[in-house]
Image (tube, rainbow, N blue to C red):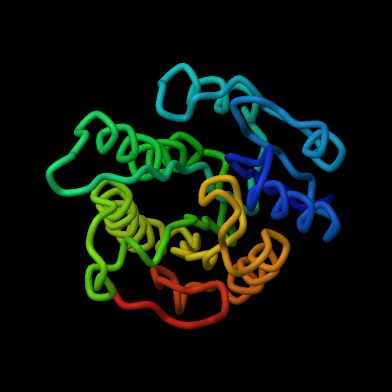
Amino acid sequence: MSLTAVITGANRGIGLELARHYASEGYAVVGVCRQASDELKAVASEVIEGVDVTQQEGIAEIMTSLNGKKIDLLINNAGLLADEKLGELDLDSIRQQMEINAYAPLKVTEALLPNLKEGSKVALITSRMGSIADNDSGGRYGYRASKAALNAFGKSLSVDLKPQGIAVALLHPGFVKTRMVNFGGLITPEEAAQGLAARIADLNLENTGSFWHSNGELLPW
């Protein structure tokens, strides 16, 4: 019986490369996205599309599609980056980033708890921009706050799920050449996916709740 990996935001970028990686490892990959891509359809065992993870209807669609299916790996990858500057704050933008980057991963994980089991792993794709200690450039109010909130959620999830034998990782992929940053990153999505997969492979109940860079560096809160 093959292992099952569920990946949100799997239609492009880092999510797509993670889907490709785990498919190549023999996983049955379930890709969750708003709009499927041909590339995702080519590697995924199942695609759940038309899903807005910020809406209860979207969460319900995931739950219905995965009813009774055990999940070995859940990767909450869907995210949004916007830029707010002091004096030009857009609170609607900040709220939207909180909804997508922080609240949605928490809601998806909670909704899929019946599908997780002892030995399952949950990976939350966060950012070192969510590190308060590491912030030396300011700005990006919504993105920083939403990723810091995600880190807090992930730490609590790791504590609450440890007795069930479920480990949780908070993973920064690196500065990746994706549409989110207008392809101005330092590493490719393929390189990021390889690093993230290595961290997930090393995830266990001893290091659950840790905040890692995909290169293996332990990041400060």
- Indicate the quadrant containing the C terminus: top left, top right, bottom left or bottom right: bottom left
Across and down, in percent, residue 30 comes to 71, 38
User: Which percent across, then down, holds residue 15?
Assistant: 64, 48
Pick out the residue farthest to the front: 87
Figure quadrant of residue 177 = bottom right
Identify the residue shown where x is 29% and y is 52%: 140
Question: Does 218 sit above or below residue 163?
Answer: below
Q: Residue at x 23, y 50 (%)?
A: 141
Q: Does residue 111 sit above or below 26 in this rendering?
A: above
Please identify the quarter of the rendering in which residue 192 is found: bottom right
Q: Nearer the viewer, residue 84 or 165?
A: 84
Give the image location of residue 35, x and y in percent.
65, 25
Q: Position of residue 3 (x, y in %)?
A: 76, 52
What residue occupies the far left of the structure in this picture? 87
Q: Residue furthest bottom?
A: 217
Up-down relation of residue 134 to residue 114 (above or below):
below
- Between 89 and 8, the one lying in front of the other is 89
Q: Quadrant of residue 198?
A: bottom right
198 on left or right of 38: left
Q: Identify which residue is drawn at 87% across, 38% down.
A: 42
